Amino acid sequence: MGALCGERRSCRGFLASQWEWLAYPSRGRSGRRGRGALGRCAGAGLLLTSAVLAGAVSAPARRNRRMMGALGVRRGLEWLLGLYFLSHVPITLLLDLQVVLPREFYPVELTNLLKWYTKEFKDPLLQAPPTWFKSFLFCELVFQLPFFPIATYAFLRGGRRWIRTPAIIYSVHTMTTLIPILSTFLFDDFSKASGFKGQGPKTFHERLTLLSVYAPYFLIPLMLLLFMLWSPYYKYEEKRKKK
């Protein structure tokens, strides 16, 4: 800014010298000073023009960089969600639904895998599932399982705004079912006198280990809910429908 002010003073000096040169042509020194001031004035104009042009060019570039960064974050989240739903299909079909479907549907290897898991992680809900937990698994069979391949396609393909409302419904439903499950692991009494007949985690470390197995099925739907509610890309579809 100081340089530009100095150049403006030089331009005013140049105009004064030019008037003196026109009035008194014999004063060659003033003419030479005027020509030097002319060069400085032209240089200041070039600097100012270059600054204006650079600002005009850099603004769209900064906008494009921000848009590319937002697109990269959105695609990363979509890939994470797509892989989550893809992995959920075999877990639901091969393990979870053994609780509500006839055991004859599953080979011995899969039933033994479920027994190993319940013994290793001391999961009381799959060892001796109560009725309320079976109702959650029945909802997983009827409502969630058909949604998993649809959500997998939508998020891995990317940019499918129609998934917004079904994803919000799924995330709220799943988090609602996980609240009593996680509360049971944290606060329930797993002694022999309880309804679980001693089957379950005894120490705090065992409870935390079991929580770490179920916690992603609460945290990822929570992330999905926030993503669908706050993402400008997915909110645009809702605004367009309202119009």
Image: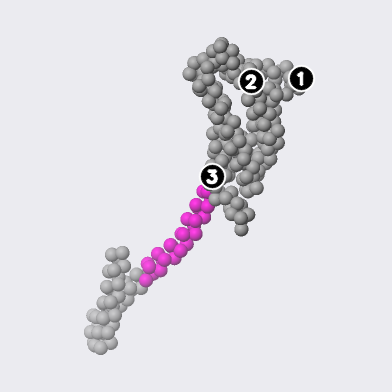
Quarter of the figure with the C terminus: bottom right
The magenta span reads 45-70
Three-letter amino acid code at the position of disc 2: Pro
Three-letter amino acid code at the position of disc 3: Val
Q: Is residue 50 magenta?
A: yes
Residue 129, numbered label: 2
Residue count near mark 2 (Cα–Cα under 10 Å), binned few <14, some 14–19, many ≥20? some
> Which is nearer the eye, 25 or 158?
158
Of the image marks 3 and 1, the number of the one nearer the N terminus:
3
Quarter of the figure with the N terminus: bottom left
> Which is nearer the eye, 133 or 124?
133
Whether residue 198 is visible, yes or no, is no
Task: Provide the secondary structure element on which disc 1 rests.
Answer: helix
Three-letter amino acid code at the position of disc 1: Glu
Cα distance between the residues tagged 2 and 1: 18 Å
Task: Provide the secondary structure element on which disc 3 rests.
Answer: helix
Cα distance between the residues tagged 3 and 1: 45 Å
Q: Are marks 3 and 2 in contact (CB under 8 Å)?
A: no
Specify whether 238 is left or right of 143.
left
Of the image marks 3 and 2, the number of the one nearer the N terminus:
3
- Foreground label between 3 and 2: 2
Q: Which residue lies under the disc numbered 1?
A: 104
Residue at the top extreme of this rendering: 192
Residue sitting at 58 percent across and 33 percent down? Answer: 176
Q: How is the image coloured?
A: one colour
Q: Is residue 64 above or below residue 130?
A: below
Q: Is residue 49 magenta?
A: yes
Q: Which residue lies under the disc numbered 3?
A: 73
